Amino acid sequence: MRFRIQSAFIACAAMVFVNAAGSQAAIVVGIGTSGALATDAATAKAAAQAAKSQLGSVAAKAVFVYMKNQSASALQSIDSVFDRSIVYGDAGISDMFTQLGRATSVAQVMAIGGDLSCAGFLAPSPNNAPQTTGKQIGDSVATVSIPSGNGKVLLIYGPSFDGGAVGPVTVAIQGVLGSSYPMSGTCASSLIYKGSIVAGSWANRSMGILLWGDFSCGFGRNQPTVNEQTGLAVRASLSGKDITKLACTFIFNCTSRTGVPNELDTIKSVLGPNARIMGSFEGGEIGKTIDAAALGDGHMICVVSIFANSITGVRQDMVRGLMAPAWSPGTAIYFLRGSRSSGLPHERYTIEGAVAQSPNGPTGVYIGDNR
């Protein structure tokens, strides 16, 4: 006998992997945007609440906020939803997007929870000295004790990157951490550091956000401002990885690429229609590939994809609340790997308690002896 359960696709549903015992294990990602409400504060709070709701009972470990203007009231409203000590980002971004499209309101929010940790470092850059900034960030990151076997990635947001400083900052960080250190980043017009907008000249601060935990990362970068190069950069971030464990993707894009047609469609055609994407357009980027050191330059698209490790279980295309009432322990379970319209093949798992105990379910499930 075979049962089939399907549900409508929810674009921003959280990703929860379930291990063989049925307990949650890994990375949970929520992305929130909001249509314009009465005030910037109300709009930003709605975006934050949307991101948080997708985490379910999992606590956020890192929150990334992109805003189009330096609205203190908007940021305060986000701080009322999340612990402000884990809130980082850019308040004054040129343009931004998620998997849902270009942002049309004041803020977009990505919340990441689960088996990872986060630490932020703010580095002054006296007289716009990028070498000083890079060394300070590198020295701070070097003090963090990361357990053996954990993945890691350093995300850099630096106002001092504009005007050609991105290269020297990158080289200075690598001088401390090594040329192969996994990192990527962008210019930021106005830093958000631990829930506050950083005061002072645009040129005298840079920020590093270090993530580490039970994950691995893929990287891609490309420079020509044509869509074919976008696809190549995104595909590079998946090289050697299991896309069924993709948690989220950061896209650091140059403002010179805002006119590339249908770029988001190209990105989603590679990552899948339900991928969690936190994208920005700024000036000056840091990007790396799997087999090459990070490069600081301009006019680039830089991609960081984060994949959960050591997980038995469920594809990220989840719809909250879907269960499998016909399932019993030991019965074969077939999970749809994509949305109903994606055309991706089914993947078989036999997972004790997975569906019954998970607060989320996949976009479709087959239960029985055959497909």
Image (cartoon, helix red, strand yellow):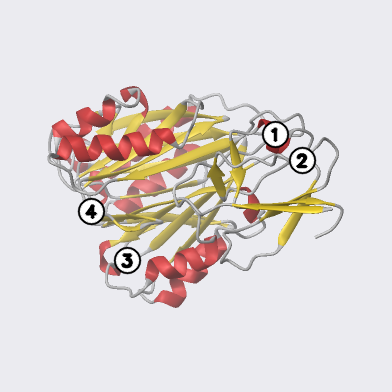
* Nearest to viewer (mark 1 / mark 3): 1
Residues under numbered marks 2 and 1 in contact, where contact means CB atoms less than 8 Å apart: yes
Q: Is 241 rendered above or below residue 312? A: below
* Nearest to viewer (mark 4 / mark 2): 2
- Give the Cα separation between the discs numbered 2 and 3: 51 Å
- Give the Cα separation between the discs numbered 2 and 1: 8 Å
The residue carrying mark 2 is 327
Disc with the residue nearer the chain's start (1 vs 3): 3
Mark 1: which amino acid? Ala
- Could you tell me residue 223's position as x and y percent? 39, 69
The residue carrying mark 3 is 299
The residue carrying mark 1 is 356
Disc with the residue nearer the chain's start (4 vs 1): 4
- Could you tell me residue 243's position as x and y percent? 63, 55
**How packed is label 3: few (under 14 Cα within 10 Å), some, or many (20 or more)?**
some
Q: Nearer the viewer, residue 363 or 207?
A: 363
Q: Nearer the viewer, residue 90 or 100?
A: 100
Disc with the residue nearer the chain's start (3 vs 4): 4
* Nearest to viewer (mark 4 / mark 1): 1
Give the quadrant of residue 327: top right
The residue carrying mark 4 is 162
Mark 3: which amino acid? His
Residue visible at 66% across and 29% down in the picture: 148
- Give the Cα separation between the discs numbered 1 and 3: 48 Å
Residues under numbered marks 2 and 3 in contact, where contact means CB atoms less than 8 Å apart: no
Mark 4: which amino acid? Asp
Q: Nearer the viewer, residue 213 or 170?
A: 213
